[in-house]
Image: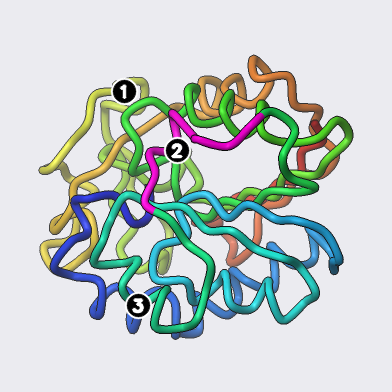
């Protein structure tokens, strides 16, 4: 997930590049439009450095953030946030603990996204919303040359391969995946992870340019 232990040592760079940036602000606006305002208890899965988490708190939510990277959580704690180190596929919270959940750019970092969605479903109360945004599997991944999401993506073979990757035609030498690697899920497997966990899809968006680099969804428990 964003903030996996692979991110230890690059937290400050990640925060400046992806959280406190135009991309980060646009992502927060997308998620907040799907989530809405509090009050209520909100779980931020893969909270990373807490830059997004802090804004959710400003919108009236009582937020708990979880991540496995101590380096990322260091910055989240400096922001005064309630965060804890936890594996998203094995959360320590009781069933039906939260009124809502969010997760941003996590499916490309975890090794078992289906396990993560099952855990999120478990700790949410019935009827609770789950807002998610991440990279678009069709246009971003080891099979696609789409640097900085500019222009038209150039597609190559490998779209249906699900193994974790560290080198691929779609990786920029200066980009995030060159530093931490990534996991690719074809669109069908990606969506099925939510459905198998029992979520109901309420809204689906493809924010951005002509060829979107993101997709965003609101699911309901």
Q: Indicate whether residue 88 is drawn in magenta.
A: yes
Q: Earlier in the sequence, mark 2 or mark 1?
A: 2
Q: What residue is shown with label 2?
A: 88
Quick one: quadrant of the C terminus? Answer: top right
Q: What residue is shown with label 3?
A: 75
Q: CB of mark 3 within 8 Å of CB of mark 2?
A: no
The residue range painted magenta reads 85-94
Q: What residue is shown with label 1?
A: 162
- Residue 212 point in image, percent of width and height: 55, 56
Secondary element at tag 2: loop
Residue at image position (41%, 29%) is 185
Query: Does residue 149 sit above or below 145 in this rendering?
Result: below
Residue at image position (44%, 29%) is 90
Q: CB of mark 1 within 8 Å of CB of mark 3?
A: no
Q: Main secondary structure of the magenta part?
A: loop
Q: Residues within 10 Å of mark 1 (few under 14, many from 20)?
A: some
Residue at image position (36%, 51%) is 85
Q: Residues within 10 Å of mark 2 (few under 14, many from 20)?
A: many
Q: Earlier in the sequence, mark 1 or mark 3?
A: 3
Q: Nearer the viewer, residue 78 or 153?
A: 78
Distance from the alpha carbon under mark 3 to that under mark 2: 19 Å
Q: Earlier in the sequence, mark 3 or mark 2?
A: 3
Q: In the image, which is nearer the foreground, mark 1 or mark 3?
A: 3
Secondary element at tag 3: helix
Distance from the alpha carbon under mark 2 to that under mark 1: 19 Å
């Amino acid at each position: 997930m964003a903030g996996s232990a692979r991110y230890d040592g690059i937290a400050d760079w990640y925060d400046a590049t992806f959280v406190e940036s135009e991309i980060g602000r646009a992502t927060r606006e997308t998620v907040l439009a799907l989530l809405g305002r509090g009050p209520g208890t909100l779980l931020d899965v893969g909270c990373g450095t807490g830059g997004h988490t802090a804004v959710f708190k400003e919108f009236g939510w009582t937020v708990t953030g979880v991540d496995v990277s101590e380096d990322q959580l260091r910055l989240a704690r400096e922001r005064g946030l309630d965060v804890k180190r936890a594996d998203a596929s094995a959360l320590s919270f009781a069933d039906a603990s939260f009124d809502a959940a969010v997760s941003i750019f996590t499916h490309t970092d975890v090794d078992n996204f289906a396990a993560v969605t099952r855990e999120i479903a478990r700790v949410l109360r019935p009827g609770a919303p789950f807002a998610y945004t991440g990279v678009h599997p069709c246009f971003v991944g080891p099979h696609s040359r789409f640097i900085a999401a500019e222009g038209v993506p150039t597609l190559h073979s490998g779209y249906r391969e699900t193994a974790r990757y560290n080198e691929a035609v779609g990786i920029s030498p200066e980009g995030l995946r060159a530093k931490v690697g990534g996991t690719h899920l074809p669109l069908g497997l990606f969506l099925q992870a939510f459905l198998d966990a029992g979520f109901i899809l309420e809204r689906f968006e493809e924010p951005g340019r002509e060829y979107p680099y993101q997709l965003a969804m609101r699911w309901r428990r």
